[in-house]
Amino acid sequence: MKRIERENKIFIGATMMILLGFVLILTLPYILTRNHGWFDFTETGQIGDTIGGITAPFIAVCSAYITFLAFWVQYTYNKKQKKDLFQERFENNLFSYLDMLIRQEENCSIEGIGGGKQAFHYMFYEYKALYYIIRKGNYLHDIQDTEKRNNEEYMLAFSIFLNGVSESSTYRLGSEVVEAVKPHVLKLNHELLHMQQQIINGEISYPKYLKDYQGKKLRIFDGHRLRLISYFRMSCMIMQYILKLENEEDQKFYLNVFLSHFSEHQLGLLYLMVYSDEFESFAFVSKNVKAFLTSEKFKKTYLSANTMRFDDDNFICL
């Protein structure tokens, strides 16, 4: 915007100087052929030579400015054309990436739930149910520091949410938590497997936050790594692509276009994911993408409901 204002000022200034030159050229013959008392050019020889000698510099300056303006107009046009071409290529790439993301979203299907945003709705509340079970069961009671315990509870819940419970191996679950939590992984894995089987057999109802799915034949806590890793990686790549733009207004506009595609539940999982970038699976989260997704501006604009943010006290009701 400032650059455009500066270019406009240059153009206006040059135009005014040309107009002034033309005014002088038109008025000087009259002025120089009259005796005005306090100055008199009527006795200076050939009046044409006098007028020519005085007006020639003005004409030369006007010619120079006209030439400059011609080059300036061409330069400005070329620069605008270059910007338009860049914007066209940028938008073509962006919407191509968005189409790829939409296809990935459609492929995030869960048996008994469906695909697309319905699947993300279920996954969000499954994480919430897991987090509630861990917090309510006080599994990490031996970690005395409250803030550290809350953080490890969230990390443990996310590890189980992503990888799923397993009868044969808990290696991945244990590899993504700190040493103080590992002793609790086996116990929690066993209890969640038992709950999973009881629900399948119809012996107990679904846990809190999943009761809306009562009656559906779901294998809860089965893991979502195959659904989410590639989806989150693509999402972060697109945001990184947008954040490389130099103009902040352009960044804001295209981020709004991109994020308007997401439901609150998808944004909640995205917000959850970015805090888990210490997991090896999420090494693709760049610094500027993390800075954006963890900013107060992002939370206020896209995740204003505190029940959508895992780190808010109102995320679950104990």
Image (spheres, rainbow, N blue to C red):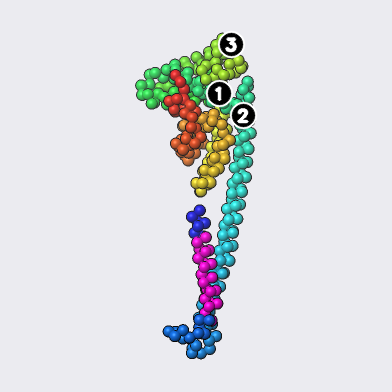
Q: Give percent across and percent down for residue 166.
A: 54, 19
Q: Amino acid at mark 3?
A: Gly
Q: Amino acid at mark 1?
A: Gly
Tell me if mark 3 has few (under 14), some (14-19) or many (20+) residues whose alpha carbon lies within 10 angstroms of its own: few
Question: From this viewpoint, which residue is outermost toward the left?
Answer: 144
Q: In the picture shown, does residue 135 fall above or below 301?
A: above
The image position of residue 44, as x and y in percent, is: 49, 88
Q: Compare marks 2 and 1 and give the one earlier in the sequence.
A: 2
Q: Earlier in the sequence, mark 1 or mark 3?
A: 3
Q: Which mark is residue 223?
A: 1
Residue drawn where x is 48% and y is 26% of the image = 307
The residue type indicated by label 2 comes to Gly
Can residue 213 be seen by looking at this rendering?
yes
- Circle 2 is placed at which residue position? 116
Q: Closest to the observer: 82 or 149? A: 82
Q: CA distance from mark 2 to mark 3?
A: 27 Å
Q: Earlier in the sequence, mark 2 or mark 3?
A: 2
Q: Secondary structure at mark 2?
A: loop
Residue 141 appears at what percent x and percent y?
Answer: 39, 18
| Relative to 262, residue 157 above or below | above
2 vs 1, front mark? 2
> Is residue 183 at all visible to an observer of this figure?
no
Q: Disc 3 on helix, strand or loop?
A: loop
Residue 14: in magenta span? yes
Q: Which residue, given by chain and number where applicable, does mark 3 sit on? A: 202
Label 1, secondary structure: give it.
Answer: loop
